[in-house]
Amino acid sequence: MKPMLLGSMLAVCGAIAACRGPTFVPDASTVPEAFSVNVTVLRGEAAGAVETVEERNGRWMLLPDGSLRAAGMANAEATDHGVRPGVVRTLREPEIAELWSLAARLGLADPNAGDPVGNPRTLEPGPGELIQVIEFHGGGMGWAFIARGPAEAGGDQVLGTFIRALADRAWMADAPPELAPAAAIRYDFGPDPYQRYRSQGKPGGGGS
């Protein structure tokens, strides 16, 4: 290759690298710019009901402004990775930093470790499957992790740990109302007919 042509190619490559900016390097102590998280859990129709929040249908989104959105298993939004669930609360900066630090400790903060997910909205669990998807965005990059397998296996422990952290901050308990036992039936027999007698003998009760 001629020196002039080689020099031109190197100059072009350098210009492209300069336009891309600095490469994002994960740092557990510093939350990346415009940090956001998008999480979906899908459970197959034939998989039995469970109490653990990271194993049942659910949606969680943490946006760059700190707003935490979530939808539980009773909400239709819990099965659509592309729909934003309702806002539950707004996290403070230290709480966001805790989540990022947790992601780093779990090995989820490195874009190079992500899985080739494609379009998560097209994922559908088999009758007995469990799918857990976590998408991260930050520092001008996006990466994702996906776990898919038999629902009876309980899902991925690492992804489940991060999902539980999000659910905890969204005030979502392990045992949802849908799985709680039915409340006892309490019959209303009207006013207490003996109340006026009970009030007699008390100060101000009007007793003779």
Image (cartoon, grey):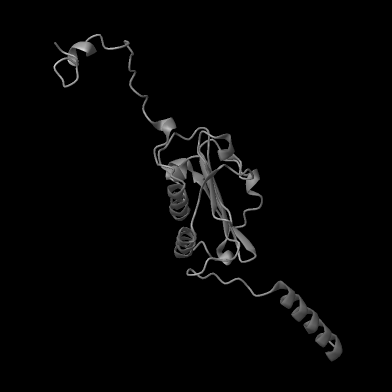
Query: Which of 5/41 is in front?
Result: 41
In the rendered image, residue 54, in percent from the top left (x then y), is placed at: 45, 46
Q: Residue furthest top?
A: 193
Screen quadrant of the C terminus: top left
Q: Tell me, yes or no, if residue 106 can be seen here.
A: no
Q: Is residue 79 left or right of residue 100?
A: right
What's the residue at 33%, 13% (across, down)? Answer: 188
Q: Is residue 182 left or right of residue 66?
A: left
In the rendered image, residue 35, in percent from the top left (x then y), is placed at: 58, 60
Screen quadrant of the N terminus: bottom right
Q: Is residue 24 left or right of residue 180?
A: right
What's the residue at 47%, 51% (across, down)? Answer: 166
Q: Is residue 171 left or right of residue 142?
A: left
Q: Is 204 drawn above or below residue 162 in the view shown?
A: above
Q: Is 123 drawn above or below residue 103 in the view shown?
A: above
Q: Tell me, yes or no, if residue 15 can be seen here.
A: yes
Q: Is 52 drawn above or below residue 16 in the view shown?
A: above
What's the residue at 58%, 66% (across, down)? Answer: 112
In the rendered image, residue 181, in percent from the top left (x then y), is placed at: 36, 27
In the rendered image, residue 26, in percent from the top left (x then y), is placed at: 54, 69
Task: Indicate the quadrant where residue 138 lies.
Answer: bottom right
Query: How many callouts does the rendering have?
Result: 0
